[in-house]
Amino acid sequence: MTHSATPDGGVVALAGGIGAARFLRGLVQVVAPGALTVVANTGDDLRLHGLHISPDLDTITYTLGGGVHPVQGWGRADEHHTVAAELAERYGVPGWFTLGDRDLATHLLRTGMLADGATLSQATARIAAAWNLPFRLLPMTDDPVATMVETTDGRTLHFQEWWVGERAKPDVVAVGLEGAATARPAPGVLEALGQASVVLLCPSNPVVSIGTILDVPGIRPALRQKPVVGVSPIVGGRVVRGMADRLLPVLGADVSAAAVADLYSDFLDGWVMDTADRGGVPAVQSLGIVARVTDTIMRTDAVSAALARSVLDVATEVVRR
Amino acid sequence: MTHSATPDGGVVALAGGIGAARFLRGLVQVVAPGALTVVANTGDDLRLHGLHISPDLDTITYTLGGGVHPVQGWGRADEHHTVAAELAERYGVPGWFTLGDRDLATHLLRTGMLADGATLSQATARIAAAWNLPFRLLPMTDDPVATMVETTDGRTLHFQEWWVGERAKPDVVAVGLEGAATARPAPGVLEALGQASVVLLCPSNPVVSIGTILDVPGIRPALRQKPVVGVSPIVGGRVVRGMADRLLPVLGADVSAAAVADLYSDFLDGWVMDTADRGGVPAVQSLGIVARVTDTIMRTDAVSAALARSVLDVATEVVRR
């Protein structure tokens, strides 16, 4: 079923990892094949053992390609860990970042292509093709960027080192995208945004997922020219997953659905929140943003699809205004 | 049992892969711990999927560390191949070079260390320590080098692409070590050679194993200052393993134990050949080289140890001359 709100220009969705991937499983049920471009965060990308790892690109790919670990929501189903066990047991290398064997094949393919001079976009396209993704998947940038956090104990860590390696224990005083100033949107990103009938924000972390995409020069200004509808990643004043509750205060923002909308108020036209957050509707509306509440806890693909329909309904409403 | 021919200065052995590793299993039984330095060929090293792979260093390490695949003579025992299967089946990447899962851990550790600025020597030392090798293992050089073969059909291939990837089918018109002119012996190589009481040549390929080590500037001249005793890799006019029979003619050399000695005649003092090659003794002696025949087919560690004793006997004889 193709929704009426996915016309000529197509849909662009800005995406982080797990939450975005679950939303996209619904979105692909209601947007025409070929009409969707997904622009994914690469601020979490890291180099480990010389490999280029793109956690959000991979989570989206595995989830939409049908290969994701169903409980974790990241990594591969039917995964093995021989390599990581050998690294740990033989070489004493701590496995702070999970590298499953099947997952490693993706990292090796990507790293090899990059070593041979390909761009991250090109590697992403090849990987997406192998998984038969029903949309175009673009990294936000081909340039090297890294989300860095500064902790209260005075250290500057890669986001993944803080979040995965240190389980987000140290408090954070600052967070930013290293390399943002000189990063260019990946080929196709600005073109897709320019053509899009509507831009969607997946329910992803407003600081280190959507926030980093917005940090790439040119993307935020492009959104101001388009109808933009987002899904709140905050439900009932709490994060569904991830660590936005730890990072929003760093930006001086409350941990609430309305506060996240406020972060986007220079370009946001519609905001879909969980029913639990209906109390935030007036605050969102006061920003001139169309507010809608529905079930945003995506326990099943059917819930994801219903959520995607609500989002496209809001988009239609926004466009008609 | 420490042999009388392993005195103060110690022993340096130049080594390729499988044949060298089997010889070293004998040599470590008859040379005092701490007295042996092994200098290994890195001409076969290759980059694959962005990984730095050092086939000869790994074969020596796994064999002497007790982790080698007992039948193959290379790679790991109890190996799994999940990563390679995923690369082939999911991504259509042909697995022309075997990358076992356990083996990959070594490549990842090495590649990560190199990416962080370590030298190949430093990575090799860490890997050797993890395997408790009973000698010092040095790469012939830390600099990037690559053994290249030119085929009769006009292509220039990395040695591993020709040997493993194309199963050595195309005939070869030239072979050489790319990067040799500017390569420097790895730290410790010339020092070990300078101090050594005797230098041994393991029964390795005279063209692409020992030959490439000799191509590193400074190593061949250093051998001319030392008693050098080698073991023939040619038995009965045939290669025990490998492809020396395909490459010796490229150098204008016969496939015979005596012809290999001739390639080394500017520095070789003693040559141990298989009993099958006793007919070559006069030719070797005519070069002013001490010749000895014994069983060189190393079916067991006991045979390897007996061969090592013969080699050290010849070294003693050479030193006394």
Image: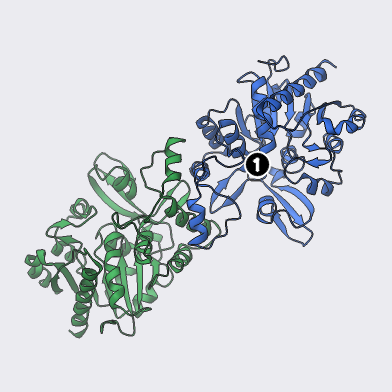
Chain colours: A green, B blue
Indicate whether B137 appears above or below A11: above
Q: Mark 1 lies on which chain?
A: B
In front here: B102 or B225?
B102
Percent of width and height locating residue B249: 84, 48
Evaluate whether residue B16 shows in this view.
Answer: no
Identify the amino acid type marked 1.
Answer: Thr
Q: Residues within 10 Å of mark 1 (few under 14, many from 20)?
A: many
SS at mark 1 in the image: loop
In front here: A184 or A73?
A73
Percent of width and height locating residue A19: 26, 61
In front here: B21 or B155?
B21
Percent of width and height locating residue B319: 80, 18
Indicate whether B98 appears above or below A275: above
Q: Is residue B249 left or right of residue A51?
A: right
Where's the C terminus of chain B, which quadrant? Answer: top right
In front here: B16 or A36?
B16
Q: Residue at x 57, y 56 (%)?
A: B95
Q: In which quarter of the image is residue B4?
A: top right
Percent of width and height locating residue B297: 74, 33
Where's the N terminus of chain B, which quadrant? Answer: top right
Q: Quadrant of residue A140?
A: bottom left
Q: Residue at x 28, y 52 (%)?
A: A175
Q: Mark 1 points at which residue?
A: B42
Evaluate whether residue A194 shows in this view.
Answer: yes
Q: How many labels does the image show?
A: 1
